[in-house]
Amino acid sequence: MAPNAGLVHLKEYDIKDSNVELIGSDLDHKVKHASAETEPAWNDGRVGLTAGLFVWRIENFAVVAVPKTSHGQFYDGDSYIILHSQQIKTDSTTDADKPPKLTHAIHFLLGAHTSQDEAGTAAYKTVELDSFLHGAAAQHRELQASPSGAFVALFPRLTFRRGGVASGFRHVGDPEDREQDEEVVTLLRVFKHPSAASADSVVVCEVEPVWESLDEGDVFVLEKGKGGKIWVWQGGRCSPMEKAKAAQVVHEMKLAKRVDVEVVSQAESRSRLVVTMLGGGEEDGFGVLKAPRPVDNLGLGGPGCEQGGEGHVVASCAGIRAEAPRRRGEQRGISHPHRQGARGLRELRISTCYHGGMRGPARLWRR
């Protein structure tokens, strides 16, 4: 019997004259670009034309620019879009009269408690921004719990606070907040991100205000109630850089709220006061204090992502367009970066980011 006896060949479909025939064509790109030009956020005269860092927050399905003074400050109930444009070095003599050539990287950040609507809007608007930039941007999906090293490197200090647009969050220092925050306890954790490119890049995260959140490897800033003293708890194994960065955070809080600050080391007996204020009893807080960091180093969207690794899925957009449509339940070929040559990966370009339920980001690539 022949080896192919009994096999049924899949029906071949012709997409010509169908509603998907023009996907990926020049006309398709022109239509998407024209649609993207109607978004006011991209038309400030700087986006796509000048190098720099641009940050937007999704507010009621709208893209709202974040002031430069607030860059690096994010809230766990929101979704954000961040564009990093860098100028490519060229021959200054021959290209002096030409507009600067730019490379673009778009990061859309999803807060831990952002809504599905906001997350979807951020993803859609990220693709739209890429269309506005004529498809020249690399796109990265960032999660609050595991931002990539490349994303962390964009900010000298990365801060995650509780709240968001949906919860009616107001910035600390607003008159309305001063009346309502009399009994609010806030605990901030200051630490260096393991995969940060910059040696002095730190992350500041608001954590649960309980003594179990303390970790001897980091620095914590405790603020209890309206007009209360700010306490700085330095873990026994925290680094000098983390102490210095925490001091900067506290200095800004002190100027804004005009309160006293007290710094205690874990080795001091006074450090028991912080444990008590965080709900600890007489026998709590002794021994080794260890708590998982709210932000880890599992983000895989940094400069090393081209090397590939477990959990990254690579597919070909061109192949998807060329192949016939598949029936439900039939799968296309999926390959892993570590099974391909490095040269082939470098020739690929990120088209769109999707998440397939894995801890790391999944990407759809296009040749």
Image (cartoon, rainbow, N blue to C red):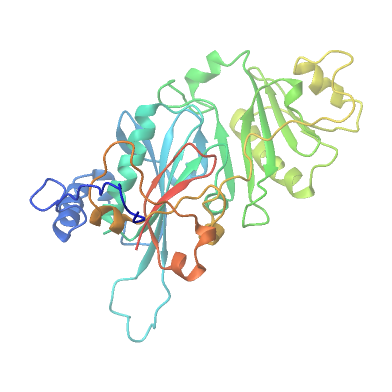
Residue 261 figure quarter: top right
Residue 118, relative to residue 333: is it above or below?
above
Can you name the residue that lies furthest to the front here? 1
Residue 69, relative to residue 167: is it above or below?
below
Tell me if I can see residue 303 in this picture: no
Viewed as shown, does residue 56 lie left or right of 172?
Answer: left
Viewed as shown, does residue 211 lie left or right of 325?
Answer: right
Viewer-proximal residue, 63 or 329?
329
Residue 43, relative to residue 283: is it above or below?
below
Viewed as shown, does residue 3 lie left or right of 306?
Answer: left
Residue 35 coordinates in the image, percent (x, y): 18, 47
Residue 242 coordinates in the image, percent (x, y): 73, 45
- Number of marks present in the image shown: 0
Tell me if I can see residue 192 in this picture: yes
Viewer-proximal residue, 175 or 64?
64
Residue 119 coordinates in the image, percent (x, y): 39, 33
Can you name the residue that lies furthest to the bottom here? 93
Viewer-proximal residue, 136 or 86?
136
Residue 264 coordinates in the image, percent (x, y): 83, 32
Instruction: Please tell me which residue is depicted at 19% across the width and 52% down the height of the picture.
Output: 23
